[in-house]
Amino acid sequence: MDSRFYALNSFIAPDFGVLVPNWTFGAAVNQYRSASHAYHGPVYLLLTPSDVCVLINDSPDNNPDAVDLLCRLPHEGRINHAPDASSVREASFSEGASALTRLAGQRRCTLAEVVPAYSVWMAGDVGFCIHDEPHRVTVFQFQDQRCVDLVAATDAQRIEPIAEQ
């Protein structure tokens, strides 16, 4: 893995207030490359009281404030939108296995079919991963280091970015 997620705060993040006015927690990775190679750049994952939002940079000259909402996934209160965490860490083997096993069960497929492009990352009792494209995100809720719930985005939640004129 060549990129690591880190926790966002208002000092190191672009102004997301227009697109996601009530975000309560955020994490980012600076150099994400999608499996299709259609996108290479930062990916921002924001939690709100009602949904998970994924934003990407849409500037041809990499202006850090040029972000666009790519995915909005309702979590219906099943995910802690304000985890008690000021940093993000890679999940332990048991946390990652618990999360991915639960995802495989939800999708009714094998564990090998849900292996993410990046590892599962943890922020307090919340885990998340991106599978192969920035909008295909899964967010996991943990309790006592076990995954107890999740929400997963599919292509149906993808929002087409607005092209610059």
Image (cartoon, helix red, strand yellow):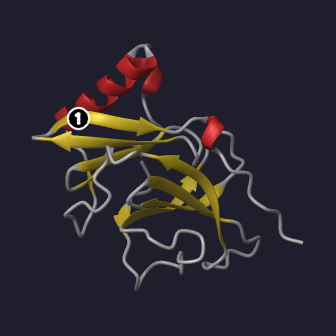
Can residue 35 be seen here? The reply is no
User: Tag 1, which secondary structure?
Assistant: strand
Left or right of residue 143, residue 159 in this image: right
Can you name the residue that lies furthest to the bottom here?
Answer: 11
**Picture residue at 27% right of the left edge, 50% below the top:** 126
Report whether residue 61 is seen: yes
Query: Residue at left 61%, top 42%?
Result: 157
**In the image: residue 41, left or right of residue 96:** right
Residue at x 53% of width, y 77% of height: 17
- Closest to the observer: 38 or 1? 38
In the figure, 19 relative to 109: above or below?
below
In this image, 116 relative to 91: left or right?
A: right
Relative vertical location of residue 129 with respect to residue 62 in this rendering, above or below:
above
Residues 84 and 95: in front is: 84
Image x and y of residue 156, in percent: 64, 36
Q: Position of residue 116 (x, y in %)?
A: 44, 35
Residue ID for mark 1: 147
Quarter-of-image position of residue 136: top right
Q: Quadrant of residue 105?
A: top left
- On the image, the x and y values in percent for residue 154 come to 57, 35
On-image quarter of the C terminus = bottom right
Tag 1: amino acid: Cys
**Label 1: few (<14), some (14–19) or many (≥20) C-alpha neighbours in 10 Å:** many
Query: Residue 43 location in percent, x, y?
Result: 53, 60
